[in-house]
Amino acid sequence: MSEPVTTDSSTTAKSGVDVASFASRRTLVFRRFLRNKPAVVSLAVLLLMFIGCYVLPPLLPYNYSDLDYFALQQPPTTDHWFGTNALGQDLLAQTLRGMQKSMLIGVCVAFISTVIAATAGTIAGYFGHSRDRALMWLVDLMIVVPSFLLIAIVVQRTKGDIIWMIVLLSAFSWMISSRIVRGMTMSLRDREFVVAARYMGVRNWRIIVRHILPNVASIIIIDTALNVGVAVLAETGLSYLGFGVQPPDVSLGTLIAGGTPSVTTFPWLFLFPAGVLVLIIFCANLIGDGLRDALDPGSRALRKARK
Amino acid sequence: MTRFLARRLLNYVVLLALASFLVFLLASYQFNPLENLEGRNPRPPQSVIDAKAAELNLDKPILIRYGLWASGVIQGDFGTTIAGQPVTDELWRRIGVSLRLLVIGSVIGTVIGVVVGAWSAIRQYKISDRVITIASLLIISTPVFVMANLLILSALGANSVLGVQLFEFTGETSPDAIGGGWNQFVDRVQHLVLPTLTLVLLGLAGYSRYQRNAMLDVLGQDFIRTARAKGLTRRQALFKHGLRTALIPMATMFAYSFAGLFTGAVFTEKIFGWYGMGEWFVRGTTTQDINIVLAIGVFAGVTVLLAGLLSDIVYALLDPRVRVT
């Protein structure tokens, strides 16, 4: 099988803290990731956008809610780089404000949902029996409950508060990943190093943290990266329909929704926020793909060798 | 098999009951169906508001309300909207609209997606594979509501260049489409082109990525070599043995995407002005109508469960290694 798995497990089984070989595996993965040009570029772009959307607004002459009555519905000029909308609000400031919301929600949701998925998945897979059955039944229930609907219902009352958005979106996006983690944990549970640790009297939670988690780490990392794009899509989608961030605050979704009716006459109102949104999700997906190639190279390299 | 199915179905019923109860609980705490009435200016007399509340059973305790609703559903009656129309009739009508919108686009998208994905797997690392991979990633990264509007934008451009209204963007039919059956047909097709194209692009991008991966997993297997060794041409070996096997893991995808189709079409329906399930979901939530939301919730739950069952059955039929216990 793929070689990283065995190195990983043997070192952890030996002592639990073999720093040298962990670092070497890490550098290996890091080097493989760096070789993937599109992924590196998109990571740089995404970081730049993340920093930019927080650093730039104070430097701009216009706040996202300021009204410029002398520039209504203006196409991009040197004064307003992205143009202005019907109220005279600067679209660049608004887009940056929307990026703050959408990216923060995306990253937070991806992390939180992955943490939930890892916890639930390893517990269900490692302990099995009643805990497994209960957790998987919960997963089934959560899948059957239409999440989009529930979030839309609740958001009406929470008025698009960003914390609530994060909580709700995370609560409904961990189920599939937890099933994958559970499957991997079940195949690890009876491996020698885990059994050995158990017979040596290591406590269960310690086995999970020390021996199980490092071995499912790659899938968890990949999942987190790919979930960023999914979460941004979910947030902007809800906001587009009016079930997310509420005015006067803006998200990329509400900006795009605002620009849609005038897409033919004042296209910049639609094109700028939409372009930024597509760029964010595209970068997140490319990073996810790059991480998959770096962490789980088995599929590609092996096949090439066989041919 | 029968026992397995029976146990499965029982579990489904319990899951559905719990899911609908959850939706009901949340909706009845969050929604105020009387808001529209109370917000009127001048405000109607309290007796009118109370009468409406009594009509909607709002004066009863929550558990009893849920019981009343559930006993109605068992008899096939999903209650009434706030305005008093029966939900069940509307539900069937909306499902019909959604099906007319979604079936063609998703079938075409799926088929082309599978073919393109398999083809790009065979040509791994060649120029065409790279172009397809990047293009499909770009499409996946484009939200539906952006894609649909971009299509509208370019269709408008095409319309003005051609000087005729070739593409239509709103609704199923034009109200002024009169004349014979042929005119009606052309009118429908004109309305279908853009939403169908949206769905085709989305399906194509998603499936080609998955199909490429599934196909790559199969291509390295020994049985492909065996098939070649026994004298099949490369094409025969790849399509008869490779593609067939690579389709097995895709069965689950097909099934679940069928389930996600109705609720996932919210944006397509909203943007192109089709009054199907997705548009109903938006309307039900914004008008705070508990019965509409519940009907959609139950419908979504049923489709997800059916899809799960279907994918398991297809799996068991296609893959001899899977045993049903």
Image (cartoon, coloured by chain):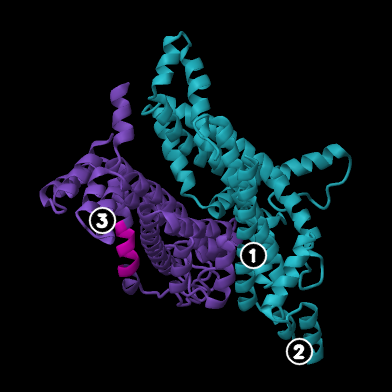
Chain letter belonging to callout 2:
B
Which chain is rendered purple in the image? Answer: A
Residue A9 lies in quadrant = top left
Label whose residue precedes the other's in the sequence (2 or 1): 1
**Mark nearer the viewer, 3 or 2:** 3
Give the x, y percent position of residue B123. 41, 25
Quick check: do tags 3 and 1 share a chain? Answer: no
Give the x, y percent position of residue B249. 50, 36
Q: How crowded is the residue under tag 2: few (<14 C-alpha within 10 Å), some, or many (20+)?
A: few
Magenta stretch holds residue B186: no
Q: Which residue is mark 3?
A: A207
- The amino acid on which the numbered mark 2 sits, given as a three-letter code, is Arg
Q: Which residues are magenta?
A: A47-55
Label drawn at residue B43: 2
Whether residue A150 is visible here, answered yes or no, is yes
Disc 3 and disc 2: Cα gap in Å? 65 Å
- Does A290 sit above or below residue B16? above
